[in-house]
Amino acid sequence: MSKFIISILAGVFLCTSTINAQTTEPAVSDSLELDRIVITASKIPLSQRETTKPVIIIDRQELERNAGRDISQILNQQSGIRVNDSYGAPSNTRILYMQGAAAQNTLILLDGLPISDPSGVGGLFDLRLLPTNNLERIEVIKGSQSTLYGTDAIAGVVNLITRSGGDEPITGSGRISYGSYNTFNGNAGVSGSAGNSIRYTINYNRESSDGFSAARDPESAGTFGSDGYSLDSFFGKVDLTLAEGITLSPFLNYARNEGEYDDGAFQDADNEYLLDMLNPGIRAEVIHGNLRLNGGYNFTRTERAFVSQFGENKFEGRFHNVDFLSSYSFTDRLQVLAGVNFQDFTIPVVDESDRNAQIISPYATFYLKDLSGFSAELGYRLNNHTEYGNNSTFSFAPAYYITGNVKLFGSISTGFKAPTLDELFGPFGANPDLDPQRSLYMNAGVETYLLDQSLKLTGQYFIREIDDLIVYTFDRGYINRDRQDDYGIELTTDWIVNSRLTAGAWYNFVDGEITTVNPQGDEITQDNLIRRPKHSFGLNAGIRVTDQLYIRADGEYNGERSDLFFNPENNFAREDVALDAYTLVNLYAEYNLRQYGITIFGDVKNLFNTDFTEVYGFNTTGTAVKAGVRVRF
């Protein structure tokens, strides 16, 4: 399908949505959807109506109704996000692609502060270290967010927002579940307050599973061993109100994941791994009239160990992040934000100098809100990196309300990804002269509310170009060389049919190609979005059958994809393979005994036992059932 056809389809959808909305002209009324406060899009609290960017919000209720699923499977249900291997063996790494971009181009935030593993491949942070039980909600912003959040935010950001203490002195909660593959999950937490000055929350989580063989047995002999895992995690946070408008919030996040993994595609092994994360930090806020001051510091230490037939390999990464910002409202319609961000990336090296780099970045953003229906964000960031020097990014995101329920939005923004420490200083192919990867992102779309704001339609078209891609070459090591071009369409709908029934659907198209310059100076362009389907769509529906019983079904279709296989029987030569399209259906049900503070739930993944492949040579789950109980006291 050509870019021209895709552009026409996007235009038809956007125009049709706008015409329908203008024809219907529902009365403007209060709406939880429009009035919900979001933080990630601007770093300051704004209602969803005031933001110029489309935001995905996964709230606490939706998280609880995904009690049988981990964070990768929850994100995989969202439009524009593909988490590869989310249905693979629990010991497998989850790889997140946002709008088709490579996994290392999406930044993970915890309460607005980035968490990073400098020792990970491409700086990737492992989603398996982040359980959902201590989260209040998740906010997702797609498109380059480097002007606000710096490196790695080329494709967007995922902000995990934690729970805070309640109004009572002490309340408790817990959840326990058991299911297929001898999978166990249990967590317990307490939260509350001490007067008006202290709020607290503490949560412990334990997960374990025997799992199944990560590698697929080509002979189907059933001799491959299962690859299980266990996860222990702790989260604690205290919100201290020191005076009116002054809040201090220290926190501690810890996780330890250990399990087994195989040698590779179609290759069984008794390998073992250990992932350990320590993430303490503190956030501060001062509000005085129209002035808001925010500061945050967090430290992330990740330790990884892999034991295989080749011995034991250990890796450690340390990441310091400091962010100070202030915002001031000159009028109800004009707001200015300015800040400075410092990041330190370190890989400790025994008997050698540590691999280390820092980035310091001042930034500023202007917000114009609802000037005769027009709003806009204009921002700029200057980055100084200790190795490559300076680079800058900008963002411009306008929005216009045609009516109270019809918003046109768009953006043009640049982003960057700094070279990793291994690329700069590592033992294989290091190149200290690398430049950052740079991106240009543009999108345009429409958001429409119909039927008294019970029906929401959103459509957008996006294009993204990433230049100076860092690639590994056998003769020169790491170099800046290639260009990546992606484009796509996203269509979504959410409908509150009535007080008992909700429904939603999404369709995604994404395509991309990489352009390489060969040694003779010729450009070679080819498709390269492996494991990412061009066409995918999803459906979901939830019904409250009675005041106690709720049932939800969701399904997804993923079209044909390509993958790469480095065949060990052919001297590890690269082979292009095709992955078949597949459809999955999942089912969830819960029954509330409110008078006792008890909810009984059950979750079925892959209801029809579909045989499908996410990564060539690796297994995915068959029908998996989990049941449990959630309590509050």
Image (cartoon, rainbow, N blue to C red):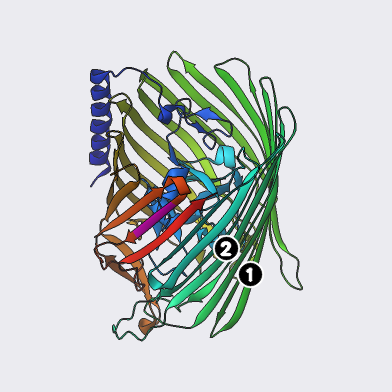
- The picture places residue 57, in percent across and down from the top left corner, at 44, 40
Q: Secondary structure at mark 2?
A: loop
Magenta range is: 599-603
Q: Which residue is at 51% across, 80% downward? A: 271
Q: Is residue 604 above or below residue 227?
A: above
Kindly identify which residue carries mark 1: 315
Q: Is residue 408 located in the magenta-colored stretch of the structure?
A: no
Q: Could you say which quadrant of the image residue 504 lies in?
A: top left
Counting residues from the start of the chain, the first of labels 2 and 1 encountered is 2
Mark 1 burial class by Cα count in 10 Å: few <14, some 14-19, many 20+: some
Q: Amino acid at mark 2?
A: Gly
Q: Amino acid at mark 1?
A: Phe
- The picture places residue 146, in percent across and down from the top left corner, at 55, 41
Q: Secondary structure at mark 1?
A: strand
**Secondary structure predominantly adopted by residues drawn in magenta:** strand
Q: Which residue is at 42% across, 16% downward? A: 373
Most extreme residue toward the top is 372
Is residue 128 visible from the viewing direction of this image?
yes
Do the residues bearing badges 2 and 1 touch, measured as CB atoms within 8 Å? yes
- The picture places residue 416, in percent across and down from the top left corner, at 54, 46
Q: Is residue 581 left or right of residue 260?
A: left
Q: Is residue 408 above or below residue 485?
A: above
Kindly identify which residue carries mark 2: 120
- The picture places residue 157, in percent across and down from the top left corner, at 51, 45
**As rendered, which of 296 and 479 lies closer to the eye?**
296
Disc number at residue 375?
none
Q: How many marks?
A: 2
